[in-house]
Each structure stands twice: as structure tokens, then as C-alpha cells.
Amino acid sequence: MQKISNNIAIIGTTASGKSALAIDLAKKLNANILSLDSLSIYKEVDIVSAKPTLNEREGIKHFGIDEIFLDEPFDVTTFIHLYQKALNLSTKEDKQLIIVGGTSFYLKALIEGMSPMPKIEDETKAKTQDMLLDLDKAYKFLLSIDENYALKIAPNDTYRTEKALNLYFQTQIPPTLYFKLNPPKPIIHEPLDIYEIDTSREILRERIAKRTHKMIEDGLIDEVKFLEDKYGRVPNPMKAIGIKETLSYFDGVYSKDEMIERIIIATAQLAKRQRTFNRTQLSKKLSTSLDELKRVFF
């Protein structure tokens, strides 16, 4: 066990045991937790996000869980504001802050910062919305003004296409050049120790399969039906792993067993991408097994 004085980030692939470890550590340190997860942030998305339940949180203050409804927009700046809110409260309470999650892109953004953005006028927003009525045409326009930026996003990514066009119409500067002229500034200034849970592919695959079957038992299908009835299929989170496969099951594309296997495969593919991101984008970290991290912390 080592003395822990800095704020901490615990990262790792999906189903690696991050949330439980963070809660145990928060109890020991009397710390608050900031969750960096692109699904747990939504209210009512409980089972498919695998967010810790209220009982599992054991009274530990969590930021980044149940913050917004599924049809409300959010992006990385949302997590920046949540970090600032969590840090301010933790400082006021004289507590450490534990950052935990599989969406390490948000942690990287906190460490490296974001470029300052201009105020988007209503007239600009209206112009962008008119163009987005034909998303294919809007994406082709983005390709014509900034091919490098356009190729980094999917042609059907309405949200990112809208942001890019708003920026261009407001500034008359292609997004790639704008971000070059306006480099990001770090958000995190306090010392931060990063720990990665490194799990073997075999063990991770077993954990993913076990968790997926538990989601089904806990009512995943009913949860997705509720979300579809309330929000439809348009919001971006309705394309998330676990939701999109269940919707295909509703459509008769998959049997129930096929749906479960598709969720397991897609989750394993996500874990592979997360592992690659953590390896290539976050170099200053201690990467070791869950058991070894428990020995470090406890």
C-alpha cells in the first residue's frame, strides 16, 4: 500500500472493474468520484450503461452519472464543466477527487484542454440547420471546405457536422485551421496520478459475456423498449452498444441469442479500441492488473 495524496484517475477497458475499485478507494480516502462515461451520464439509461446503482455507490458523491436526459445534447465540454464542479466541491470539502471511466478521450481532453470556441449567433445556427436538412449535402460541403476534418467524422454524424459548420459559418475559417490558430489549454492543473487496469483478453471476454447476460436478466430489453417509446431512435445514444442490437432484435433482424452474441462481440471490439487509445494517447500512467492495483491502494 502506498500513500495517496494526489487526485487519481482510474482507466481501463469496459468491464475491467473500474467502478467498483473506484468506489472502494473513495470509501478509504473519503473522496468524491467523477465518472467519465458517455452512457452513464444519462438518466434512465441504467442497465445498458452498467452504471453503479445507488446502493453500489454506497453514499459516495458521484459526478457524471444521471446528469442529463437522453435527448439532451452533450459533448466533451460537458465533462469539462463537470470536472470543474467536482473539483471545486472536493476542494471545498477538503476531499480528493477520483476520476474513473472507460471514455479516456474525455480524460485526455481534461489533461490537454480544449480550444476556445466563438459564440455561435442565432443567424449562424439557422443557416447550419437549413443545410442539415440534407445531411448528405451538408457533409459534402464540409468535405469541400475542410477535407481533413470531414474525413475524421462519419458522413451520418449530424452532431459533429453541425458543430463544424457552425464554426465555419461563424468564423469563415475551416475547422482544421481554426484549431491550429487556437490551440487548446490544459484544464487539469493539479497533480493527477493515472492508473490503468490491464486485463488479459481472455479474462475480459469472460467478464464481458457474464456482464451481458446479467444485463439481460436485469431487464435490458425492457429498458431499451422504454427508451425507444420515450425518445424514438434519433438521439445518438440510441446507437450505443447494447441499444442498437436490441433495436435490431425488435425489428426481427436478430434472434435473442444472436442479439446477445452481437452485444458481446461489439463490446469486445470496443474494449480493443479503448486499450489501443489508452496505450497510444495516455503515456504517463501505471498500467497493471486489478489485483496488483488493489495491493497498491489497499
Image: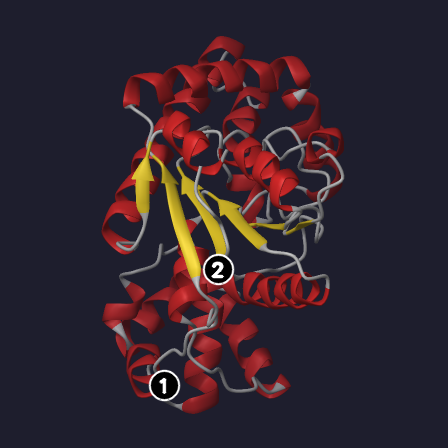
Number of marks in picture:
2
Residue in front for this viewpoint, 280 or 268: 280
Q: Horizontally, is 115 left or right of 82 in the view?
A: left
Pinpoint residue 192: horizontal percent, then vertical percent.
44, 59
Q: Residue at x 45, y 85 (%)?
A: 169
User: Would you place residue 66 above or below residue 12 in this image?
Assistant: below
Between discs 1 and 2, the one toward the N terminus: 2
Quarter occupied by residue 142:
bottom left
Residue in front for this viewpoint, 42 or 262: 42
Q: Residue at x 48, y 52 (%)?
A: 8
Asked if residue 36 can be seen in this view, the reply is no
Kind of element beneath mark 1:
loop
Q: Horizontally, is 207 left or right of 214 in the view?
A: left
Residue behind mark 2: 158
Quarter occupied by residue 44:
top right
Residue behind mark 1: 182
Asked if residue 206 can be seen in this view, the reply is yes
Kind of element beneath mark 2:
helix
Q: Horizontally, is 15 left or right of 249 in the view?
A: left
Whether label 1 touches label 2, CB < 8 Å: no
Q: Residue at x 58, y 55 (%)?
A: 97
Q: Which mark is residue 46?
A: none
